[in-house]
Image (spheres, helix red, strand yellow):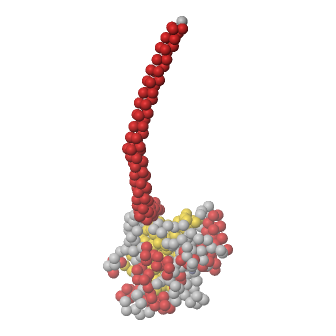
Amino acid sequence: MTYNTSRKSRGRKKRRKKKKGLSLVIFLFFLILSLAGLKAISEHTVPDWLADISSRTELSEKLADSAGSFLDNISPYIQEIRDTAGSFLESASSSPKETPAPPDENGYFRIYFLDVGQGLSILIEADGQYLLYDGGDRDASSFVVAWLKQKGIEHLDYLIASHYDADHINGLVGALKTVTADTVIGPDYTAQSKVYQSFVTAVSEQGKSIVTPVPGDRYLLGEGYFDVLAPLSDSYSDANDYSVVLRFVYGETSVLLTGDAEAESELEMLEKWPALQSDILCVGHHGSPTSSSDEFLDRVSPSFAVISCGKNNSYGHPAASVLERLSSRNIQIFRTDENGTITVEGTAESFQILPEKESTACLSPIPDIRKLSAYAGCFLFSRHFFARISFSPIF
Ligand SMILES: [Zn+2]
């Protein structure tokens, strides 16, 4: 047993020794493999990964830097493109620029520069449609209302406040209590005055709100139309420069209404609109020397000027310097303080100016052939006779 046992025991010991040796060999084999693998990794693979990752990071940083500076460089252009696209879309959406068909042979218009003393009020009629631009001051309100009644006008297609000074909107409050108005237009600012509040109230009582015009907007009136040329800025130090400036066109005739716009607004219009030429200019701010700059008069180049002002007014309107600027350009002048209400009536091809009263300015001897025709009767002005070039606004 023992032997057996010892033999068995020796056999077991031998097998254990063999197993230990085999395990050692396997262990050493794997150790060598592991070390070789680690060596290979340490010498080759890891540095490549790291280099690869590192170079990729550098490349990414370089790309990011380049993209950043590229975006910085093009951002002004992107903004410009956005602005251009925005203003294009704005103007495209808000201004029907197409010129309507010329008025037919039965078409007509009348413009009344009402004698409202120191203030402004202009009524335009075109083929049975009406536009009232300003309504004069408080003492003229009843006159304006009476005029509307006398003409049988119960409805205005447009009622426009050039701006919110009392000598322009007092009469509009009276008009709004007498007639209805489709569209009420006024500049985008508020005034701290009772009459402004009365105007806002009168507009809201008609269920309307004041429409702020966008420069370049075109509105139809009968077979004619008018374009909004100003105001072109959001804020002015002088409220007069907020004046809504309109260029009314009927067939071959054009009339520019400037409210009380001063030289600052005139300069903006000169920069914005290449074509300002008009046959008749309603002179800005009652003939104040702060309006009607030389450059503006040169560009508008009117044949006739109308000045709305009160007799012997305390402002000294119209200024002698403005009268000189007009007459030196051979522009025929009509004044409500001397001529009373001034009526312009015409068709698609011609118009005549009919002052209520003749004035010394109208009767003074004038060498210019155009003024001779005016002298001959405060007159009929035919565009065909003078072979004038017709103007159209370029928007
Ligand atoms: Zn005024």
User: Residue at (55%, 81%) from the top-left corner?
Assistant: 115
Picture coordinates of residue 25, whole percent (x, y): 42, 27
Quarter-wise, where is residue 251 in the image? bottom left
In front of the other: 231 or 138: 231
In front of the other: 86 or 202: 86
User: Residue at (47%, 23%) from the top-left corner?
Assistant: 20
Q: Residue furthest right?
A: 194
Q: Quadrant of ligand 1?
A: bottom right
Q: Is residue 161 visible?
A: yes
Picture coordinates of residue 381, whole percent (x, y): 39, 80
Classify 46 as above or below 87: above
In front of the other: 285 or 135: 285
Q: Is residue 378 visible?
A: no
Picture coordinates of residue 310, whole percent (x, y): 57, 85
Picture coordinates of residue 195, whole percent (x, y): 65, 74
User: Residue at (45%, 68%) from the top-left corner?
Assistant: 216
Q: Residue furthest left?
A: 387
User: Residue at (43%, 31%) from the top-left corner?
Assistant: 28
* Image quarter in which the N terminus is found: top right
Q: Residue furthest top?
A: 1
